[in-house]
Image (cartoon, rainbow, N blue to C red):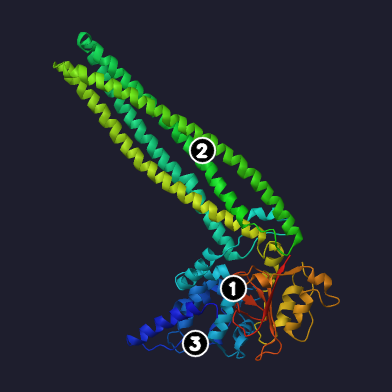
Amino acid sequence: MLFEPFFNKLEDSLAAQSESGVQVPSLNSYTIDTNIFSNVDLEGFKQKIADGLNLDGSSSIFYKTIESAGVESVFDYFDKNGDGVIDDDELNEVASSDGNEEDISSYDITQLFNKQQYQKIIDNCEEQIDDYRAQAAAQASSSTTNNSSSTSSTGSTGSGVSKTSSNATESLQSTIDKALEEDIPALEEQKEQIIAEADEAIEEQNNSLNTLVKNNNNILSDDNQYFQQIQKANDQIDNYNKNIDDANSEKFGYESTLSNLQAEYDAIKTDTKNDEVNKANEERKSEIQEQIKEIENKIELLENRIERYEKSIETQEQNKKTAEDKLAELQTNSKNDAVKSMQEIQSNIEQIRTDRDKKVAQIDKQIEEKRTEIIEQQQQLGELTGKASSGPFANYNAEAGQALANSALNVPGTYGRCLGGVNNSLCNTEYFGDGMWFESAYMAIDALQGNVSGYENFASKFEEVTDSVSREELASLPAGAIVVWEQDPQNVHGHISISLGDGRESSDHIIAQEVNRDAQYHVFIPV
C-alpha cells in the first residue's frame, strides 16, 4: 500500500495512547457505520469530522485520517454528483470497495486516498508522510535522467523523463540560479561596501596629509614626494586588483558553462538503439565541441590578461617599496612634530588598507567556494542533460504519457481484471483511442512489440525500453509508461499496469509500483 508509512504513523500514535491507558482500536480492524454520513451537506460533514465520534459516542480514528487528507476534498470524493449532499447511493459506492456497503473500512479509506490526486494527498498529509517524502526525495536525487530542454536536439516527439528525476534537475537548476542571482551578488555587494568605506577613510587621511604638508611645506616637501609615490603605487595596485576581479568573474562564467558542456558531451551516447537519436546526438556533440573550443579560447585570453595584471602589480609593489625605503630614511633624520604627524597618517592609511584587504580576502574566499560549488553543480546538470539525450526516455512523449496517467487515476477498484483496467484507461485517452483485447495480460507484450496483426499502428505509439530499466527503476518510471509481466508460477495470466509517474501503478486498481514479481517484465513508453 502506497500510504503504508502514513497509516503506520497513525498506528504508532494509537499504540502510544493504548499504553497510556486510553483504550482505542487498531486502525486496520476498525470500521465506521456508513449511515453516519447519510444525507449530510459539506457543513454537516465538517461537523461530523470535528466531533470525531461514532454513532455510539466512541472515538473514531477514521476522522483523523479524513481530516489529514483534507475534509473538503474527501467530501467531494463522496459527493459524486456534485449536488452538495452525500446520498445513500454515493455512500454505498464509497463503502463497497471491500464488498461491504454497511460500513466504511480501512480498505475503503485506502481506496479513497489512492483515487485522489497524489500531490493533494502529499500537501494535506504533510506531517504524517514525512518519511515517505524523504524516500521520494532520495529517489529524486539519485535519478540519472531529467526533463531537459536539450531533448529537442534529439529529434524526439516529446520531452521529459520521470517526475522524480525532473524534480531533481529543477531543484539543481534552482540552486544554481539562486547562487548566481542572489548569493554571489550579495557577497560582491558586501565586498564593494567594504572597499567604498575604506576609500572614504583613506580620503579623509589624505585630506589631513594635504593640510599638514601645506602648513609645513619647508619641512615635509621631500617627504610628501615619496608619500605621493607610495599612494600612486597603492592606487595602481588597487586598480589592477579590480581588473583581476573582473577578469576572474568573467572567467568563472566561461568555466561554469564549460563544465556544463563538457559533462553533457561526455554523457551523450551515439550508440543507442535508435538511429535517429544517434544522428541527433552526433550533431549535438559536434555543436558542443565548437562551443567548448570557443570558450577555451576566451578563457585562455582572460588568463593571459590576468597574468599581465599580476606582473604589473609586482612592478608597482617594487616602486612602492623603493619609495617607502627613501621616505623612511628621510623620516629617520627628521624628529619634529610635523614628521611624526605624517608618520601617523601613513600608519593609519596602511592599517585601513590592511583591514580592508583582510575583509575582502575573506569574502573572496566565500565567493571562490561558491563558484567552485556552482561549477560542480553545472557539471552534474550537464551530465543529466547528456543522459537525457541518450537514455531510455529520449523519445518519451510527456504529453501523451501524462494524459494516459491522468486517465488511469479513474479505475473501478476491482481485482483480477488488470488488462481490462488498462484498456479502459487507454480507450479514454484520445492519443491512443484503443486497447489490447486478449485473454491474458502477458499477451499484450507481443502486441506492444508490433508482432500481432492489427496492432501495428497501436504499437507504433510505444517504444520498448526494457533493457535500460532495472527492477529498482520501475518505481521511478515516467507517467504513462506501461509495464507488462510475463507468466509466473503463481499467475498464469501475468500482469499489466500503467505508471502514474509518482511511484504508483494503475491497472483496475491503484497500488505502489510492483517490482518484485517472480517473472520477467517489459517496459513500454509512449512516443
The answer to whether one can see residue 156 in this image is: no
Q: Residue at x 26, y 15 (%)?
A: 224
Picture residue at 65% right of the left edge, 63% below the top: 391
Compared with 492, 123 (above or below) is above
Residue 211 picture quarter: top left
Q: Position of residue 475 (x, y in %)?
A: 59, 73
Give the residue pinned by disc 2: 250
- Image location (x, y in percent) of residue 499: 65, 73
Depth check: give the residue in front, 316 or 335. 316
Q: Looking at the figure, which quarter contains the N terminus?
A: bottom right
Q: Which mark is residue 214?
A: none
SS type, badge 2: helix
Q: Can you tell which quarter of the image residue 226 is in? A: top left
Left or right relative to 75: residue 290: right
Q: Which residue is mark 1?
A: 475
Judged left or right of residue 164, residue 215 is left
Could you tell me residue 467's position as x and y percent?
67, 72
Q: Residues within 10 Å of mark 2 (few under 14, many from 20)?
A: some
Please report whichever mark, 2 or 1, sits nearer to the chain's N-terminal start. Answer: 2
